[in-house]
Image: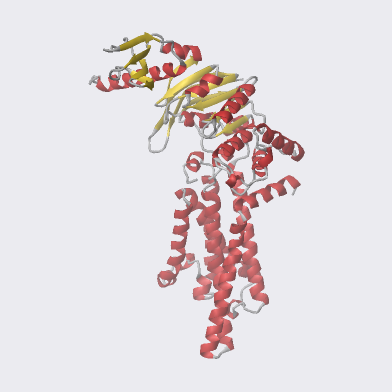
Amino acid sequence: MVITMRGVTKVYRGQARALSGVDLTIENGMFGLLGPNGAGKTTLMRILAGILRPSAGSVVVDGIDCSTERGRTAVKRMLGYLPQELGVYPDLNAREFLDYIAVLKGLNDGRARRARVAELLETVGLADVAGRKLKTYSGGMKRRVGIAQALLNDPRLLIVDEPTAGLDPEERIHFRNLLVDLGGERIVILSTHIVEDIAQTCQRLAVLDKGRIIFTGTIPALVDVARGVVWTVTTTGPRPQGTVIAMLRSGEAAQYRILSEQAPVVAQGIVAPAEPGIEDGYVWLMRDQQSAGAMAELTPVASA
Amino acid sequence: MNSAFLRRIGQELRILGALNLLAPLIVAAIYLGFSLIVGYATLHNSGSPADARFQAARGLLALLENGLPLIGGLLAAFVVGSDPAIELHLAAATPYRFTAGLRLALIILWTTLCTGGAALVITAAGYWLAILQSLSIGESILLWLAPLLWFIGAGATLALLLRSRAASGALLGMVWIAQFIFKPQFLQNGVLERVYLFLTEEAGVPSYWLANRLILLAIALALLGLTMLLLGRSESLLGGEH
């Protein structure tokens, strides 16, 4: 299965431009979509899910052209989707809610549907509380209901938008493992601004900023973006120059993880180069974008 | 009707909620109570049972022509105005237009049953106004069906255009109140009298009564058609309140 996006642009009413000429090819496996809040990730997810139509460009999913209503409906039949903000019907219990969503997804065989709902309630650890109304659920429990509903139709394309928001660390690990298990024979697109979630699950990723794809590649390739610019600085003096990624204070001294093209200069302390991580690569990439943006603003536009 | 569809209807009714479904019955009980009080007060003041009966019957006519239609419109605005699981609906193979249309149909069916049932009970109890005796059965149904569908169509359309239950409910309430405040202007204008919603209650059965009901019905059907069109706009549906 392959998803191909060419020149996808989305301009909302009121002229807000959410996406600009996005080109992306996604193949089977786990694919991460990383970017700051407001980068356009949710818009991209909604276009892939057939919820929104792009203003320009094309989306082809497994050979199906999504520019038509028929095409979008065909994609929805193979889709599992967990939105960023999952709304539920508070007076239904988890079993009733999942049964209802299963009907919407076209699971019309009552016996098979009930069996699938029971299986997924077990998978997400809600079987014991499946009879409780959803309005009594915590945020994390609702998130698990959301995960279960996305899997109801055993989707070939699974799109999850900020899936681990509201989950405790144990639940996050459980869910990440579940996603990796699912990512074999299907496409799983994980959109998040949590770098750690991508690092632990995805083979490939794209980084989106201000509606544009600024990076596509593997996790090691993103890590390499920051190679040679990561430093650890231990000092009792003032904060060194550069982008501070982490800081650990121990008595008078502080240890910094710094991103800087040049080795930071400190009066008292130790400076050493460090191996980059995915977070370093991401931050350096975003910093480059901001610098490029600032330069573009400073550069006078030639007038005719 | 197969069992899967019946099950779906059961699910939609659960989502609508018991309180919303009880609302028309609560309104009917309130109007009935006020009608009885007005009848009793008239009897107490004038001593005329005929006057008391007339005043009570007028109150019950108001239930059919302006009480239950308003609640129908508010329910329609509530049902299509927002859905907490809208994004899941839009990502599902079943079109949201079908789901919202089904919910709206359930509201129409339920409020029609309530209003029609109330009309039957009023008639059986002998509180059907004498001036309405000339109406055929079809016209007697039009008496309440036209404003009922008008309010339902207006409520649904406003909710989708404004993307707010509160704003659409408030506007619908303003339209309802305006019918009383601007009654003289409506009834003295050759065009406005044809679209006056509470014509029977305020003016009886004038010569243009049937035209008024048919025009209201036509507007209602146009509004319901517009509602179905608006339900296809995913981008707009996502922008509503949650």
What x and y, as percent, mark residue A202?
55, 19
- Name the side, left or right, on which B208 lies relative to B183: right
Q: Kindly identify the residue that appears in the image at 57 percent across and 75 percent down.
A: B33
Query: In the image, A297: left or right of A104?
Result: left
Left or right of A32? Residue A248 is left
Quadrant of the rendered image containing residue A223: top left
Residue A186 location in percent, x, y? 63, 22
A23 lies above or below A40: above
Residue A243: which quarter of the image? Answer: top left
Give the answer, above or below, for where B219 lies relative to A69. Answer: below
Residue at figure coordinates x 59%, y 19% from the top left: A29
Residue at 55 percent across and 55 percent down: it is B76
Indicate the quadrant where residue A100 lies: top right
- Residue name at image x 65 percent, y 63 percent: B113
Residue A298 in the image: x percent, y percent? 25, 21
Q: Quadrant of the C terminus of chain A?
A: top left
- A139 vs B200, nearest the viewer: A139
Residue B153 in sight in this render: yes
